[in-house]
Structures are given as C-alpha cells and as structure tokens.
Image (cartoon, rainbow, N blue to C red):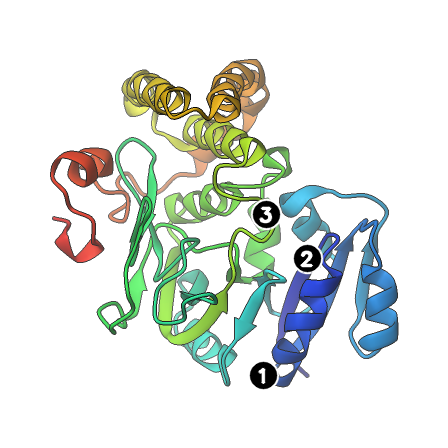
Amino acid sequence: MKRIAVVILNYNGAEMLRRFLPNVLENSPEANVYVADNGSTDNSVETMKREFPQVPLILFDKNHGFAEGYNLAIGKVEEEYALLLNSDVKVSPRWLQPLIDYMDANADVAACQPKILSYRNMSYFEYAGAAGGFMDKWGYPYCRGRIFGTVEKDEGQYNSISDVFWATGAALMVRREIYIDNGGLDSRFFAHMEEIDFCWRLRSRGMRIVCIPQSYVFHIGGATLKTTNPKKVYLNFRNNLLMLYKNTPQSNLECVMRFRKIFDNVAALKFLLTGNVKAFRAIREARRDFKVMKNDFEAARRENLAKCVVSSIPEQTDYSILRLYYIGMKHKFSQLP
C-alpha cells in the first residue's frame, strides 16, 4: 500500500496538466497521485478524463481558493503523508524517496520541502521557497537562495538538510494527521502566505519543518498571478498582517504592528512613485481590510498562543532583513549573520 498522496490542486490549468502531469506520474511510483479540481471553467476536467483516466479526480463545484481547496482535498485522501504540489512543477527522478526517508527517520518533523529550482532557468533557485524559508523580526519571509527580488544561482551552497521556519506550498509534504489536527491551511487567506501561517503554527507547537535538498523540483512560479499583479499584492500584504496578528506573541505584537504600518506605507509610496497606482491602492486596501477582518481572527490567536510551547523560534531571526538587504547590501543568504 502506498503511503504518500501527491495532491495537485488545479483551477483552469488544463495546459499545465498536459505539460507537467506526465512527468509527475512517471517519477512518483511511491505515491498515489490525485488531481483536485477547484471548479474549473476551462476544459480541465474533460482533459483529465480523456488523457489521464488513471488519475483519481477530486471535484469541487466552485473555486475554494488554494487554502480551502487543499483542506478539502486532503480530507478526502487516506495516505500517511500528503504532498501538496503545484500544477506547474516538474519533478526529478526519485524525488520523493529522500523526503519519505527523512520523515520516517525523524518523528518530530511535521513537514518538509524539496529544493525548489527555477523551471525557466534551471541553474537558479526559484522565488517561491528556494532551499527553505525563514522570517525576520518584522514578519518578512525570505529563503536560503532568495532574499526579496535577488535569486541566487544554485552552486550546491545550500545542499545541507536544514530546519526552516516555513516550507513552500509549491511542494509541501506533511503528515496528514498533523495537517488535519492542526487545522490545515487557513481558508480565510484564500491564497498567499497560508503555508507560512501553517508552518508557524506547527513550529510554535514544537514540531520541526525541514528542507531536504537531496530532493529537487523545478517550478515555473507566477503561473497564476504575476508578482506585481494588484490582487497578488493585496493578498500578500493583507495575509501577512493577518498571519502576524494570529501568531505574534503578545509581548511583541504592538511593536511589530507599529513598524509594519511604517514599512507598508513606504512600500505603497514606492509603487505610487514608480507609476503602479493599482499596486499602491492594493496595499492601502490590504491594510484597511486587515483592520476590518482582525476581530474574526481573535479566537485563532488565542488558540495559537495557548498551544505555543516554543518561546523563541530559531528560524525567525532577530534582525531586520529589510535593513540588511537595502542598507547593509546583504543580498545572499550566506551573507546574513
């Protein structure tokens, strides 16, 4: 019996399925591969039934978003491990075995990711996840191999297995029971930042998150929304604030939120001065909607703080990545303190 479910969430991605699903099927003999369709309005379902009849389909009647789509899909599989895989990922031969072996040998590891390389430039890391994610004192995520817009070339410099703060949702492997017992991805996020929020929850409850670079995949990235797309800007800023509110210890919350207001306004002004008025408005709307939605997250905040057993997470660094990057000119992870 296969112990891992690879779950690909699809929304109007028929071409991506045609392009990448054969590669996943060929290189994942250890897994049962599922496609969960999020109410697609293109010919995705017809394509699956006609060209991939051997792949089980999980069908939803509407687009539930990334977070709830995966929650619903993982609720329908029974394997020990679930691996959330983006539809625009090319995997490598035997990519699953290093992940399975490490998780089997380390019961305290709740989730892991492979090394994420760029499909468009395969010698470089990919923006979303690279060789594992970290977070600074103000809530800004960055990676081994990618800080803000600087993506490093993969020269084997991050080939060691490493504990990380967060694992990318592009290829996130998790113990299924832990995923369900800890609430899965927060569906109120809809998309963006939900995997970081989820991993923060696990880390604060004493579980480990790991990057295992002996497994590697190639991710197109940005296949759904471009980085400066106003909707993506909105979701990233709003969800980052919601994540901080849900998880930041009470002793730090006021200070973090005060500084984030300053930083967010600076980011909005930068968009405005460079002519991206829609992105400027997206940040302003994100901050406004955060204030409106904040009270709805009060119960989740209380639960997270009550279940927290780790007072200081090592992978949440005590420095400002903004200061080091823009003032200290530290553009590579290896240059950080």
Residue at numbered disc 2 = 9
Along the line of sight, which residue is nearer the eye, 18 or 159? Answer: 18
**Residue 322, position in %: x, y?**
23, 34
**Residue 250, position in %: x, y?**
34, 23
Closer to the N terminus: mark 2 or mark 3? 2
Q: Image point 78% across, 74% down: which residue? A: 55
Query: Tag 3, which secondary structure?
Result: loop
Taking 336 as reference, is 230 above or below it?
above
Along the line of sight, which residue is nearer the eye, 64 or 31? Answer: 64
Name the kind of residue labelled 2 in the image.
Leu
Local packing at callout 2 (Cα closer than 10 Å; few below 14, some 14-19, many 20+) is many
Name the kind of residue labelled 1 in the image.
Asn
**Residue 97, position in %: x, y?**
48, 82
Q: Is residue 281 visible?
A: yes
Closer to the N terminus: mark 1 or mark 2? 2
Residue at numbered disc 1 = 27
Name the kind of residue labelled 3 in the image.
Gly
